[in-house]
Amino acid sequence: MKEDDPENRPKLRYFRYAVISFTALVVLSLGFSLIPADPPAPADPPFSEQARAAALQDSLDLRTAAGRLSASAAAGGGAGPAAADKTVTLLTLQARALLSPADPSAAEDDPASATPLPSGQSGPAAGAATTAEPTLSGLASALSASGVQRLTDAAKADGGMARLLAGAGTAQLLAAEDLAAAAGVPAETLPHAGAAVSPAAGAPASDSTASACPSILPAPAAAGQEPSAAGMSAVLGSALSAAVAAEQQGLYAYQAALPRLGAGDAPAAEAFLGQHRELAARAAAHTRAACSAPPAQPPGFVLDPGFLANPRDGLARLEVASLSAYGDVIAQADGGLRSWAIAALQSAARRAAHWDGGVGPVPGLPLDEDRLPELPASPAPASTGT
């Protein structure tokens, strides 16, 4: 028969091969499609989030070392337990301010049984790998290094986070100097203690930028709308104008206080008066560059009734009040202007500290401590039997 013709057998064989090959190809393609692809690597978190997480970890590590130092000093009658206790309080509040709901491992050990920080340690991380007892000088060195890192990160972080980091770094530098003084160590020996930008730097070379400003600033953005670039410039100009007003009031207050201060306070007040005069001029130049008109120097200010009787307290209150103005500028500015505002914030905090004014755990950012999240408590460590 024709079907049994030997000439047809190769054709049927090739047809079977084609069918089998096609079937195998379909099976393989279905198999490949059913195999799940490798998930993409998670994207790196934004810089501001990385800076916040690093600041939180450093504050917890340093708080741990300060807690152990305080406990050992209290038990053995060592020097500086009060300074260490103050540092524990500062770092606890800063850690609470830096906490995020996304932090799953924010808990740390009891400060009294914490990992110590060795003397001469330039950063908190390496202190966790040693069993040596912490010292005031070592804690001061590590705290100063952490403060400088926070200020460095503040220059590049987003607005609100920059304000938080700048305040935390400023407070850490001041606390490091207090610890160094309690340990009898010169503050100049702290790592990078003079790394901050001078508030006299960073001002515009001229006010030529103001000539390019529009004569009419835009209206504020409606609720729910993103502000325009011009609108953001107006917000920055308003913050700078507030800084100018704070400096003008500081000028007036120091001029009124100088004749009433004692001989021991007069030299510092004279130097601070010069700082306020320079800051007022720089802030006014920055305000004009931001297309805003700086407020004119008023003939006088109404001072607190007790100011003339106790000018030290009055000057402390004025310096503390000016911190928020520079915090606003840090949050709105960037680049060289933000660096200038960070340095001005440090300058104001140091003047406030000189007059024994409390600058808080985050100078430039008012905090309601009662509304800060609590640090999670870590479980008690299990016994090792040794």
Image: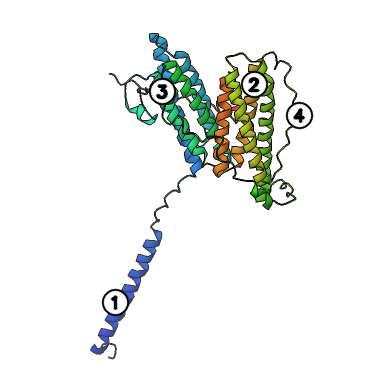
C-alpha distance separating marks 4 and 1: 102 Å
C-alpha distance separating marks 4 and 2: 19 Å
Answer left or right for 7 relative to 82: left
The kind of secondary structure element at disc 3 is helix
Q: Which residue is mark 4?
A: 299
Going by the picture, which residue comes out furthest to the top? 77
Q: Which residue is mark 3?
A: 139
Dot 4 alpha-carbon crowd within 10 angstroms: few under 14, some 14 to 19, many 20 or more? few
C-alpha distance separating marks 3 and 2: 31 Å
The kind of secondary structure element at disc 4 is loop
Dot 2 alpha-carbon crowd within 10 angstroms: few under 14, some 14 to 19, many 20 or more? many
The image shows residue 225, relative to residue 99, as above or below, that is: below
Q: Where residue 173 sits in the image (x, y, percent)? A: 49, 27
C-alpha distance separating marks 1 and 3: 79 Å
Of circles 3 and 4, which is in front? 4
What quarter of the picture does the C terminus occupy?
A: top left
- Tag 3: amino acid: Leu
Q: Which residue is mark 2?
A: 315
First along the sequence among labels 3 and 4: 3
First along the sequence among labels 2 and 1: 1
